[in-house]
Amino acid sequence: MIKHAMRALVLACALPLFLSANFLINDQIISPKAAAQIETMGNELAQKTGIHAYVIATTHTVSRTTNLYQYLKRYADKLSTPYAVLFFAPNSQRIGLLSSSDTIKKMLDSREVKHYAIDIISTQDSNSLQSKYDVGIVQAYSEMADEIATAKGVKMTTTIHDKYHWIITLVRWVVLLGALIIIWIYFGHPIYRRIRYGKAGQ
């Protein structure tokens, strides 16, 4: 009984957030806590730059052949221009960065923004998938907001890019090191042994 009451209380507290969400279109993929961070950053960015940064997190299947700009049209009534959109469809393993104009597109390093999400979500560790979705998308959104703000010559105070940048860098180095170890074990070491012992036997 207490468990059900607590669950109802959490839903009641989260409901106003979802009803007032401006920058997150969410199929219950991103948690209320992460959603609040996105809304805070999105509000500051819109106030300072006039650009609206959105996250669309959907459970729908979006095939690799689907044009994301065409798919984005179904959300047209929920987007205010000018805008940038971080699109996330985990069930289809797709993540994209879209914008309403070439001007905004030039403000963004699409590869860098997407890497913030991909590096966290794809990490093999004990964290839950929900936690990875939350951290990865919030990190990517923060990077997107910072890049837009920098291009517009303003400073964001609510983004978290600088605070956790070292974590992303560490993850990338760990992934790179792991790849190098695998290459060495399966390719480098056998070649080294053939060269060394092959010559020794001649």
Image (tube, rainbow, N blue to C red):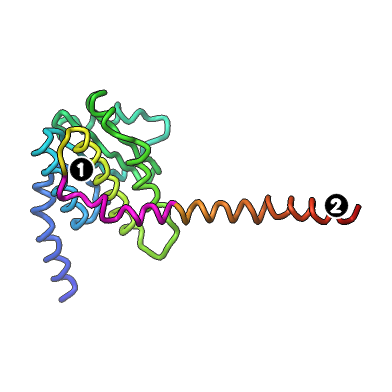
Q: CA distance from mark 2 to mark 1?
A: 64 Å
* Residue designated by label 1: 25
| Residue 57 vertical position relative to residue 31 in the rendered view, above or below | above
Residue in the image at 37% along x and 46% along y: 91
Residue in the image at 11% along x and 55% along y: 15
How crowded pointer 1 is (Cα within 10 Å; few <14, some 14-19, many 20+) is rated as many
Secondary structure at numbered mark 2: helix
| Side of 82 where 110 appears, left or right | right
| Side of 78 where 191 appears, left or right | right
Coordinates of residue 145 in the picture (x, y in percent): 21, 41
Q: Is residue 7 magenta?
A: no
Q: Is residue 164 magenta?
A: yes
In front: mark 2 or mark 1?
Answer: 2
Residue in the image at 16% along x and 50% along y: 158
* Quadrant of residue 1 within the rendered picture: bottom left
The amino acid marked with disc number 1 is: Ile
What are the residue bounds of the magenta stretch? 156-172
* Quadrant of residue 89 within the rendered picture: top left
| Side of 105 where 126 appears, left or right | right
Q: Of the numbered discs in the image, which one, if any, rests on residue 199?
A: 2
Which one is nearer the viewer's eye here, 19 or 193?
193
Which one is nearer the viewer's eye here, 52 or 200?
200
Marks 2 and 1, the one that precedes in the sequence: 1
Tell me the chief SS of the magenta region: helix
| Residue 61 vertical position relative to residue 104 in the rendered view, above or below | below
The amino acid marked with disc number 2 is: Lys
